[in-house]
Image (cartoon, grey):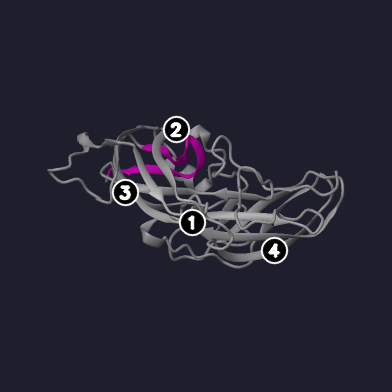
Amino acid sequence: MAIELEIRDGSPHWYLSPDIWVVKEPEDLIESVPVAGMPFFVKAKVKNHGTTNATNATVKFYWANPSTGVNRNTAILIGQSFISLDGAGEADVLCLTPWVPEYVNNGHECLIVEVFHSSDPLPGTVDFNVPTDRHVAQKNLSVLMAFRSMFHMNFEMHNGSRKKAKFNAKVEQVSIKELQNISPDLKEKLKGKKEGKLKNVDFTNERCMDKTREFSKCKNNSEEFTLNGFGKKPLAITGNIEGDYVFLVVTQYHKNVEMGGLGIVVINDKD
């Protein structure tokens, strides 16, 4: 093999890469949970599986609204760095340009990082194709504080194709063990807490249930919708949990094929 660059995808959820993380200061070794309006720095672990040295490989860092059809035309470039790797080598790469999370539409952003070299170029497309392209990975994880067990999350779903298509979004609880890399900040937030369960959830923009929409009636964990070519749709989930915290994934499907998604750690603020 010559040069074969890679940033690992998450497993089983490819949009939760363990090799993309955020720090408060460039020299920090400990990962942080990003906070809106404050500057942070993004890092990524890059590997060269080839036998040839890669000199000055390019690493680009992007952010985007939590969505699944984001491409190189719609994602926002944070900055880029360069890295040289020996054959079979790996290294952590820092984006020197700070990233300030905006949390557009009250949702959290996802991070996308790609690596390439003149001898190992990117595919000739605007699409990232995260699950099939070893050059690119995505970290789409949010941490929410539930108020009296209630939570609300805004996000977007996209159609990455030029053709009109039908999609389905589904929210479900999975074990926190499926999150491959838990940051020290998040570990601290979960310290002494016990994993609970998702009690009720609904695809709705309503933040709090009133007397006409009680949580006990919120059993809609999926939503069907149609998007025009390259179209997008804002969605939101509202629900409540039982216990200290839960880990949720919202997945977008097209004809039962997983198109993308986001992970959400919901922590119950009982005070």
Q: Which residues are magenta?
A: 245-270
Identify the residue position indicated by label 2 in the image. Answer: 174
Most foreground residue, 182 or 7: 7
In this picture, is 27 found above or below 245? below
Spot occupied by residue 225 in the image (x, y as percentages of width and height): 37, 46
Check if mark 4's residue and mark 2's residue have beta carbons within 8 Å.
Answer: no
1 or 3: tag closer to the N-terminus? 3
Q: In the rendered image, which quarter is residue 9 located in?
A: top right
Q: Mark 1 or 4, which is nearer the eye?
A: 1
Give the farthest residue toward the front. Answer: 163
In the image, what residue type sits under mark 4?
Ser
Which type of secondary structure does the marked residue at label 1 adopt?
loop
**Which class describes the residues within 10 Å of circle 3: few (<14), some (14-19), or many (20+)?**
many
4 or 2: tag closer to the N-terminus? 4
Which type of secondary structure does the marked residue at label 2 adopt?
strand
The span from disc 1 to disc 4 (Cα, nearest Å) is: 29 Å
**Which class describes the residues within 10 Å of circle 1: few (<14), some (14-19), or many (20+)?**
some
* Residue 81: image tag: 4
Check if mark 4's residue and mark 3's residue have beta carbons within 8 Å.
Answer: no
* Residue 152: image tag: 3
**Residue at figure coordinates x 25%, y 44% from the top left:** 148
Identify the residue position indicated by label 1 in the image. Answer: 230
Provide the major secondary structure of the magenta segment.
Answer: strand
1 or 4: tag closer to the N-terminus? 4
